[in-house]
Image (cartoon, grey):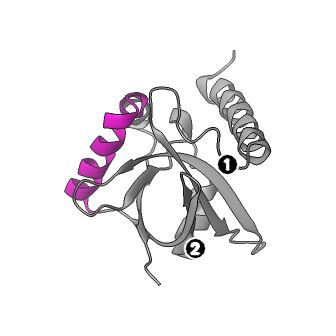
Amino acid sequence: MITYDRVMHAVLGTTTRAHRVLHRVSGGRLGRRFPGGATVVWLTVPGRKTGEPRTTPLLSARDGVTGAWVVAGSAGGQSSVPAWVFNARAAAAGRLEVDGVVGEVRIEEVTEPVERDRCYRELIGVWRWFDGYARRNAEVRQIPVFRLHPVTP
């Protein structure tokens, strides 16, 4: 039997690889929005084991309170936590590209329940599938939510 996780792993992997190629070939001009208009940000953090930079495209929303970018380790609703989450937790800082502009960010995992839920609702507002991802995983795991705060020089 083919499980949701196996199918979504293949779909997400293919989509991410295609997005990376599109981003590279276009010099970052294409793929800045996901179907439906959600902003795609590119988070780069060192790998927690290798120290090598790891760049991940993520759907994001602006936090209406802090102005930071909000992202979630949803993995498209899979039951496993994506690798970038562990790297982000270990790094606490990284580089973010949004609409071709690159800058440093401080990474904050939002763990306080009310604030986490508020931030997650921001994501649902830009990509309704986030709601289904959370419901699908309610008994397996809580999807981690992060705010990416721009660091001014």
Instruction: Give SS at disc 1.
Output: loop
| Badge 1 amino acid | Gly
Q: Nearer the viewer, mark 1 or mark 2?
A: 1
Tell me which corner region of the image, top left, top right, bottom left or bottom right, holds residue 110: bottom left
Q: Which residue is mark 2?
A: 90
144 left or right, relative to 28: left
Q: Earlier in the sequence, mark 1 or mark 2?
A: 1
Q: Looking at the image, which is closer to me, 80 or 89?
A: 89
Q: Which mark is residue 10?
A: none
Counting from the top left corner in percent of width and height, residue 12 is at 65, 33
Q: Position of residue 60 (x, y in %)?
A: 44, 47
**Residue at point 37% right, 28% down?**
128
Q: Quadrant of the N terminus?
A: top right
Q: For the view shown, which residue lies furthest in the bottom direction? A: 153
> Where 4 sits versus 133, above or below?
above
User: What span is colored magenta in the figure?
Assistant: 112-132
Residue 80 position in % (x across, y down): 58, 44
On screen, residue 35 above or below 27 = above
In what element is the residue under mark 2? helix
Residue 102 magenta-highlighted: no
**In the image, is residue 118 part of the stretch drawn in magenta?**
yes
- Residue at the image point whose x is 39% and y is 54% from the top: 70
Mark identifier at residue 28? 1
**In this picture, residue 68 sits left or right of residue 26:** left
- Asked if one can make out residue 144 in the rendered structure from this viewpoint, the answer is no
The residue most toward the top is: 1
